[in-house]
Image (cartoon, helix red, strand yellow):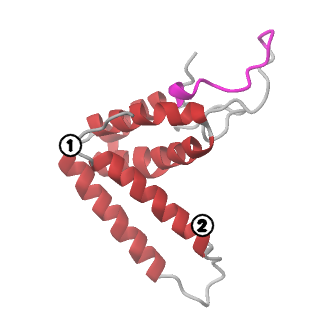
Amino acid sequence: MLLSANADGCKPPGFNAWGLVSEPNQSEEAPVSVRKHHEIWIEQCEAAQGIKLRYGVEAAFDYVVTEKLLNFADAAARHPEFARDLPRFVSEVRRMFTPQEIGAHLVRIEREQIDRSSDIDPDDDFIPESPVTAAARRQQFATVKELLTVTALGTS
């Protein structure tokens, strides 16, 4: 069964950001510990289509790429079941946006990341991310960018 978000777009209590069940389902015999990983990205792409219609391409791209695809790629690095579905998720995102939209929004996101890192005031209470974390985040973005912009996706 696919979960549906309520009117404000939130998942029901008991589900984490990935849509994974965080507590047993009391109504079934066996507890449900993990939703099927492919349901996660399918729902996220469906939600992005609604966002695209309601709020525009930029909002949909930010949601599905900078929030969902980057997190999914991070999980794919640690969990084989996510890694197996990553090419399908990337392929669906590529289908949702034109190559021009993808290119323009990736450039915008990179520019925003640079602007954000240069705007940090040392007198603020803001705790900057470690150089290792920042490097990992940049590498992850570069990988997702390549997957979204490569001429042809292939499997090996």
Q: Magenta segment: does it hold 49?
A: no
Position of residue 125 relative to residue 14, above or below, is below
Closest to the observer: 146 or 155?
155
Q: Position of residue 24 (x, y in %)?
A: 79, 24
Drawn side of residue 11 relative to residue 145, left or right = right
Task: Give me the residue at 73% from left, 20% from top.
Answer: 32
Q: Quadrant of residue 94?
A: top left
Q: Is residue 62 visible?
A: no
Drawn side of residue 148 relative to residue 25, left or right = left
Drawn side of residue 75 relative to residue 152, left or right = right
Instruction: Give the residues drawn in magenta, as a range.
Output: 27-40
Q: Is residue 5 visible?
A: yes
Q: For label 2, count other residues whose C-alpha is less than 10 Å away and answer few (under 14), some (14-19) or many (20+).
A: few
Q: Quadrant of residue 33?
A: top right
Position of residue 142 relative to residue 128, above or below, is above
Q: Amino acid at mark 2?
A: Thr
Task: Give me the residue at 77% from left, 11% from top.
Answer: 28
Position of residue 29 relative to residue 75, above or below, is above
Q: Going from the N terminus, do you reach mark 2 or mark 1 first?
A: 1
Closest to the observer: 13 or 146?
146
**Badge number at residue 133:** 2
Q: Position of residue 47 (x, y in %)?
A: 42, 34
Describe the element under mark 1 as helix, strand or loop.
loop
Q: For label 1, count other residues whose C-alpha is less than 10 Å away and answer few (under 14), some (14-19) or many (20+).
A: few
**Badge number at residue 3:** none
Q: Magenta segment: does it hold 30?
A: yes
Q: Position of residue 83 (x, y in %)?
A: 52, 36
Task: Give me the residue at 61% from left, 90% from top.
Answer: 123
Q: Amino acid at mark 1?
A: Thr
In front: label 2 or label 1:
2
**Badge number at residue 98:** 1
